[in-house]
């Protein structure tokens, strides 16, 4: 599987771990990020399946959404970081395209930017 098959990544972090999960659409990535955030804000251990198919329940401290940019062959931040230690009202909100300063694919935001 290449980065173009699943070009969106939700990076879930906590004390001593950082686990990515990849998704085919931006909508799937944002739905998973918001699900994890909701459970983490409730103080629960969050169950998720990582990139290599392992499922675990962890105390989540941070969530980042990245997108694969095939033009530059790099992962770029797609949304503002959510942090349990420093919550922000902008967390998991898409970053404007002009913030990156590099060319982005035409479908960077998928079907909509509102999630």
Image (cartoon, grey):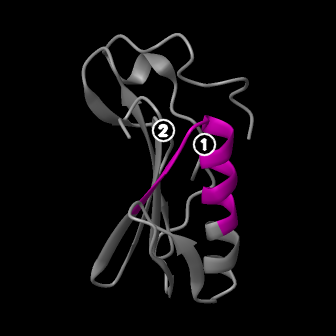
Magenta segment's dominant SS is: helix
Q: Are marks 2 and 1 in contact (CB under 8 Å)?
A: no
**Which residue does the image show at 60% across and 25% down from the upper left?**
109
Q: Does 70 lie within the magenta span?
A: no
Q: Quadrant of the C terminus?
A: top right
The residue carrying mark 1 is: 93
Q: Secondary structure at mark 1?
A: loop
Decide if residue 74 is on the left or right side of residue 99: left
| Image quarter of residue 15 | bottom left
Earlier sequence position, callout 2 versus callout 1? 2
Q: Is residue 12 above or below residue 64?
A: below
**Which residue does the image show at 70% across and 71% down from the upper left?**
38
Q: Tell me where residue 34 appears, x and y as whole percent.
A: 67, 59
The residue carrying mark 2 is: 6
Q: Which residues are magenta?
A: 20-35
Decide if residue 84 is on the left or right side of residue 102: right
Q: Tell me where residue 49 appears, x and y as whole percent.
A: 52, 69
Q: Secondary structure at mark 2?
A: loop
Disc 1 crowd rating (10 Å Cα; few below 14, some 14-19, many 20+) is some
The front one of 97 and 48 is 48
**Which residue does the image show at 38% across and 40% down from the upper left?**
1
Decide if residue 40 is on the left or right side of residue 103: right
| Image quarter of residue 66 | top left
The front one of 81 and 110 is 110
Query: Looking at the image, is mark 2 or mark 1 nearer the viewer?
Result: 2
Q: Tell me where residue 70 appears, x and y as whole percent.
A: 33, 20
Q: Is residue 94 above or below residue 88?
A: above
Q: Does 31 lie within the magenta span?
A: yes
**Which residue does the image show at 57% across and 17% down from the upper left?**
107
Q: Is residue 63 above or below residue 30?
A: below
The front one of 75 and 62 is 75
What is the C-alpha distance between the residues marked 2 and 1? 20 Å
């Amino acid at each position: 599987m290449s980065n173009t098959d699943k070009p969106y990544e939700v990076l879930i972090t906590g004390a001593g771990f950082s686990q990515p999960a990849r998704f085919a659409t931006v909508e799937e990535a944002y739905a998973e990020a918001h699900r994890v955030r909701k459970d983490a804000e409730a103080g629960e251990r969050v169950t998720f399946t990582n990139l290599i198919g392992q499922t675990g329940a962890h105390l989540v401290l941070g969530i980042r959404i990245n997108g694969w940019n095939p033009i530059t062959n790099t992962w770029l931040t797609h949304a503002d970081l959510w942090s349990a230690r420093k919550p922000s009202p902008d967390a998991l909100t898409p970053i404007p395209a002009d913030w990156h300063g590099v060319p982005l694919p035409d479908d960077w935001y998928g079907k909509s930017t509102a999630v």
